[in-house]
């Protein structure tokens, strides 16, 4: 079951990378795009816990870094931290309630944007604070709005494949 779950998750990551790179400018929300891979990381760590969630977050972030070719390691580090922290706080939460993933994606998105900004500043990027706050607000809003459209399918997938597994 774990292998099948991991393979399907890898396919989802590849689909998210391809879809995210092909999204037209018409679906921008105030200049922000949704972070489909971050949503996937948050969903995954809700079901697998902090260790596997952090490791999967690292793998997803590294795939994103390699696919996009900028700031190699930044998304890997940040998504690993988000996966670990969100996984740590949501392991024993009632996942059937839609508010749980909404709140997790909300604060996971906030955490992701803040960590990307901080780590980016540490490594020498000079992103304007106004731009970071703008993307934080509208990127988080965009991610949260996608939860009701995507979580049901992910829940069914994860619940079915992980039900008998001890992840």
Image: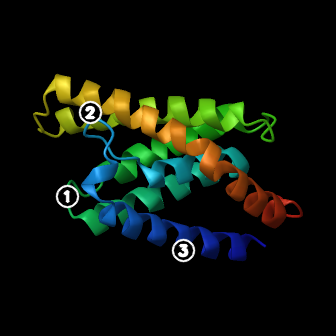
Residue at mark 3 to residue at mark 2: CA–CA distance: 28 Å
Which residue is the site of mark 2?
A: 117
Q: Is residue 34 left or right of residue 11?
A: left
Residue at mark 1 to residue at mark 2: CA–CA distance: 14 Å
SS label for mark 3: helix
Which residue is the site of mark 1?
A: 70
Question: Comparing marks 3 and 1, which lies closer to the viewer?
Answer: 3
Q: Residue furthest right?
A: 164
Q: Residue furthest front?
A: 26
- Looking at the image, which residue is at 62% across and 52% down? 150
Q: Is residue 126 left or right of residue 15?
A: left
Measured from the top left, where is residue 158 in percent x and y? 74, 59
Q: Is residue 22 left or right of residue 88?
A: left
SS label for mark 2: helix
SS label for mark 1: loop
Quarter of the image where the N terminus is located: bottom right
Which residue is the site of mark 3?
A: 11
Q: Crowding at label 1, few (<14), some or many (≥20) Cα neighbours within 10 Å?
A: few
Q: Crowding at label 2, few (<14), some or many (≥20) Cα neighbours within 10 Å?
A: many
Q: Is residue 59 left or right of residue 67?
A: right
- Looking at the image, which residue is at 18% across and 23% down? 130
Which comes before the other along the chain, label 1 or label 2? 1
Above or below, 154 relative to 104: below
- Looking at the image, which residue is at 52% across and 31% down? 106
Whether residue 167 appears in this view of the structure is: no
The reply to whether discs 3 and 2 touch (Cβ–Cβ < 8 Å) is no
């Amino acid at each position: 079951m774990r292998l099948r779950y991991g393979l399907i998750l890898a396919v989802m990551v590849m689909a998210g990378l391809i879809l995210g790179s092909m999204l037209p400018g018409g679906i921008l929300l105030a200049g922000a795009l949704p972070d489909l891979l971050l949503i996937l990381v948050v969903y995954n760590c809700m079901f697998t816990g902090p260790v596997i969630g952090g490791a999967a977050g690292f793998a997803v972030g590294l795939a994103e870094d390699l696919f996009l070719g900028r700031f190699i390691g930044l998304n890997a580090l940040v998504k690993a931290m988000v996966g670990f922290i969100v996984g740590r706080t949501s392991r024993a939460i009632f996942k059937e309630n839609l508010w749980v993933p909404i709140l997790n994606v909300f604060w996971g998105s906030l955490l992701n944007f803040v960590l990307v900004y901080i780590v980016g500043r540490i490594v020498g990027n000079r992103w304007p604070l106004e731009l970071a706050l703008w993307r934080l607000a509208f990127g988080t809003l965009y991610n949260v709005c996608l939860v009701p459209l995507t979580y049901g399918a992910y829940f069914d997938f994860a619940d079915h494949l992980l039900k008998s597994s001890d992840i």
